Image: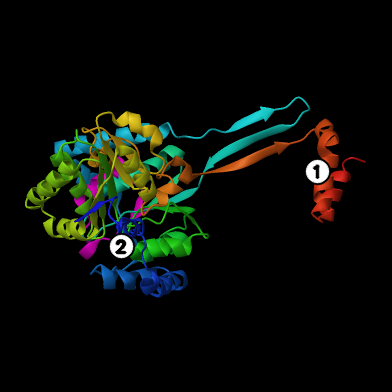
Amino acid sequence: MKVLKTSDKNFQNEFQELLNRGKVDISNVENIVREIINEVKKEGNKALFRHIAKFDNWTPSKNEDLEISKDEMKKAYENLDDDLKKALHLAYDRIKTYHQKQLPKSWIDFEENGTILGQKVTPVSRAGVYVPGGKAFYPSSLLMNVIPAIVAGVKEIIVTTPVIENKPNELLLAALYICGAPKTYKVGGASAIAALAYGTESIPKVDVITGPGNIFVATAKKLVYGDVNIDMIAGPSEIGIIADSTARADYVAIDLLSQAEHDEMASSILITDNEPLAVKTLEEIEKFLEELERKEIASKSIRQRGAIIITKNIKEAISLMNEIAPEHLEILTKNPFELLPFIKNAGAIFLGEYTPEPIGDYIAGPNHTLPTGGTAKFYSPLNVEVFMKKSSIISFSKQAIDEMGESCALLAKTEGLTAHQKSVLQRLK
């Protein structure tokens, strides 16, 4: 794990590497993904069958084999351990309550001259949700993507997920049942994204695609964007922590590892003005690593992509973290809320020592689908508005066009758009 000091001569070069952490070269996979998309567009289910046989080790024999039945979901839910049921329902309720507060409103404003202006908010007709599967299963990702679509009022939600050897994960099936048993298809990777974007004999075309995935999924989403909307191009997970001398090193260490265990490419970055905390954190990381089931992944991530930066003061720490713009940001200082006004760039902000990042992953309520790789500088977490669209409402009265028509016609004339000009003047005659 790199340990850097802002006073070091080569600090800026080392820091630039951290800023470039999210840069992923997709050129090696782009042609492969483009070919997969074209095959699905041309051949539909036939291509899906071939891709499933190749990547997921089973072969559907008929179109109906692609869909997971509602009975399977219900059975999995009924067989679920009571404590897991309770945890899933707790997560569902909190996520739904939070996202209900995000709902935008339609509005209409009446002006004295008879002008009516407004906004009409409408959910998309059909949303596609991709849920990763393979190395691991993430029911939490299902909840975080499906629930905002439900809250937005989307009538038809289509879920796709890879199912290795045609054996769906029972916990994922139970989570699907809790979400109202949306139509779910056993298709993964770039093939699933293509099917959602363009439709096949079994899978209907959607208006927006959300959900995380590997580089093939991310590349596919990038390539189909424009034909459908997408949530974001997500990269490897990451966490940033700002901590002072009051922070507990064991909390800091395990929170850094909570992201490192996701992926060898995950980034875990601590910025502190307290060098003893940095030293103690390194010691605690080594202790915790021995206890982790995903030790090999976490070790590689923390050693190759992890960093500790020692600053002159907390003000400098905040400035550097705003440049990093992390997906998750924990503030472990004496008075974390005092720092909040100065945080400009972060996907989600966790305040205080009793708010570890995993609380946000599962049960806090805000969405855990967050901008990565520094894109928090201009992008937001997944939210209900991704599943909605806005239409402007405009209605002018005779009085209103008489008052403003000449100005409108003049602007049109200035831009050389004669038909625009005459369209207005015709009504002033």
Which residue is rendered at x = 41% and y = 33% of the image? 100
Q: Which residues are magenta?
A: 159-184
Name above or below for residue 109 compared with residue 422: above
Q: CA distance from mark 1 to mark 2?
A: 59 Å
Closer mark to the observer between disc 1 and disc 2: 1
Label 1 element class: helix
Residue picked out by circle 1:
408
**Residue 18: x percent and y percent?**
32, 56
Furthest residue toward top:
112
Which residue is rendered at x = 46% and y = 60% of the image? 197
**Residue 384: x percent and y percent?**
44, 41
Res 48 visible:
yes
Task: Name the mark on residue 396.
Answer: none
Residue 304 drawn in magenta: no
Name above or below for residue 312 compared with residue 397: below
The quadrant of the rendering that contains the N terminus is bottom left
Residue type, label 2: Asp
First in residue order: circle 1 vs circle 2: 2
